[in-house]
Image (spheres, rainbow, N blue to C red):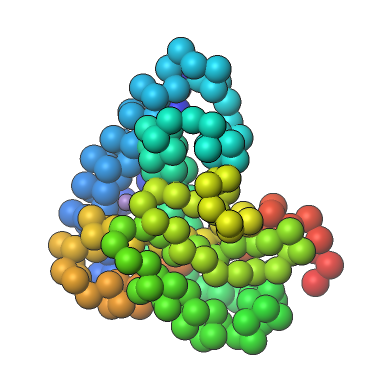
Amino acid sequence: MAFELPALPYDFKALEPHIDARTMEIHHGKHHAGYTKKLNAAIDGTEIANAKIEDILANVSKHSAGVRNNGGGYYNHALFWSILAPASESELTGGLNIAKAIERDFGGLDNMKAAFKKAALGQFGSGWAWLCVDADDKLFIAATPNQDNPLMDVNDIAGKPILGVDVWEHAYYLNYQNRRGDYIDGFFNIINWKEVSKRYNDANPGASAF
Ligand code: MN3
């Protein structure tokens, strides 16, 4: 069963002015569509043709560079669209478990944002910055190159990503040119915290202990 490009849960303009409509249209319709198509081509007729994407990524060292690059690209962008929302709907309310976990593990949202931005700016060239949950249910921040992510067995990061930002230039160049930091600041205004909190709860069955 082939992977399908997930539909965006909002229209191309919904994230403006922080991410412009043209960038969204190209990013979803060309880049993400391309990763999806190439992933399907890379797994077609192989023993992982019907595998779950999380299982493919967890064992990605056994597969081709095409599976690594396009499987990562497929998964990372699907996560990215899901954790974005129009600015009017981006609210981190204290009742969400993710708000309590950020307070516990970073001492507040501003500290988390500063560490996340540092990771995003520190990723040389193309890649992603992530907020992840580790095996002890603690949050941590990481960055990975290219289309790698913390689910893959090709890095020393061990955790489930629950929030991520694409720092490839195709994600921001039309609107921000080389100003990656301004793009990250804009990104902080359009985070779907309800979805991040849901992903936190799913990653961490103990979260309801708050
Ligand atoms: Mn991208």
Quarter holding residue 52 = top right
- Side of 205 where 92 appears, left or right: left
Residue lying at the far top of the rendered structure:
45
Quarter holding residue 187 = bottom left
Q: Is residue 176 above or below residue 2?
A: below
Indicate the position of residue 203 as horizontal and vertical percent values. Answer: 69, 54
Q: Residue at the spot x=78%, y=55% of the render?
A: 205
Q: Residue at the spot x=54%, y=22% of the render?
A: 48
Q: Is residue 4 above or below residue 19?
A: above
Quadrant, the C terminus: bottom right
- Side of 154 where 181 appears, left or right: left
- Side of 174 where 53 appears, left or right: right
Q: Note whether residue 13 is visible.
A: no
Q: Residue at the spot x=68%, y=61% of the render?
A: 134
- Side of 123 where 130 appears, left or right: right
Q: Residue at the spot x=33%, y=62% of the render?
A: 167
> Number of labelled discs?
0
